[in-house]
Image (tube, grey):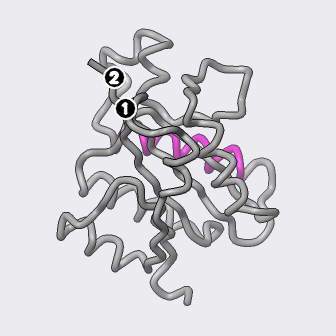
Amino acid sequence: MSRIYEHFALLIFGQGLWKESFTKKISEDTKSSFFHFSGYTKDSLFCTCPICNALIKLFDPMRTDEYVDRCNLCLPLYQKLERMKGSNEGMIFFSHNCIREAELLQNLTNSLLSNEKIKKIYILEVEYKKIDKEVPLIIEELKHQRLPKSEFISLLEKKLYKYRVIYEIFKDNYY
């Protein structure tokens, strides 16, 4: 039996220039919110082991100074999101834990887009088996959907949210 790998990818696309202090704060707040919105607390059993902890928390896949659970899909996904970000301010986070409840994903979206220095976010969730498809094919077959926040929330409420779709979500009053 083959193990199923989960990926949650989040690209936070910046508005204007970010100071280092803001980048650090948004990083900490986002990691904390994701952990909370994933249904865990600091007292959860997963918090006692660094390896287990790395499976449920958001991480920067390019940081080598902390334990991260990079798999064979992480780097190609990161490269794709990095190309989408381009030279704009922003950050990319991954988790090997998908947010299963629509309400929690909605809360994360609302929380991030309520910040005036965040222009938009990209959310992607992928489940795959190692033998499912080759990684380049998974990356190539990803779909892209651009939505204002209200339409994304509606999509969640109607249970139309799909894996392997990069959702580009922007503020309702932005465009």
Above or below residue 62? Residue 21 is below
Amino acid of disc 1:
Lys
User: What is the spatial separation of the Cα atoms under label 2 and label 1, in whole angstroms?
Assistant: 6 Å
Which residue reaches farthest top?
A: 49
Assign a secondary structure to mark 2. Answer: loop
Label 1, on which residue?
129
Seen at 76% across and 48% down, the residue is 21
- Badges 2 and 1: C-beta atoms under 8 Å apart? yes
| Residue bounds of the magenta highlight | 23-37
> Magenta region's main secondary structure?
helix
Q: Which mark is residue 8?
A: none
**Is residue 8 shown in magenta?**
no
Q: Quadrant of the C terminus?
A: bottom right
Amino acid of disc 2:
Arg
Give residue 131's position: percent from left, percent from top.
40, 29
Seen at 60% across and 58% down, the residue is 12
Label 2, on which residue?
3
**N-term-proximal mark, 2 vs 1:** 2
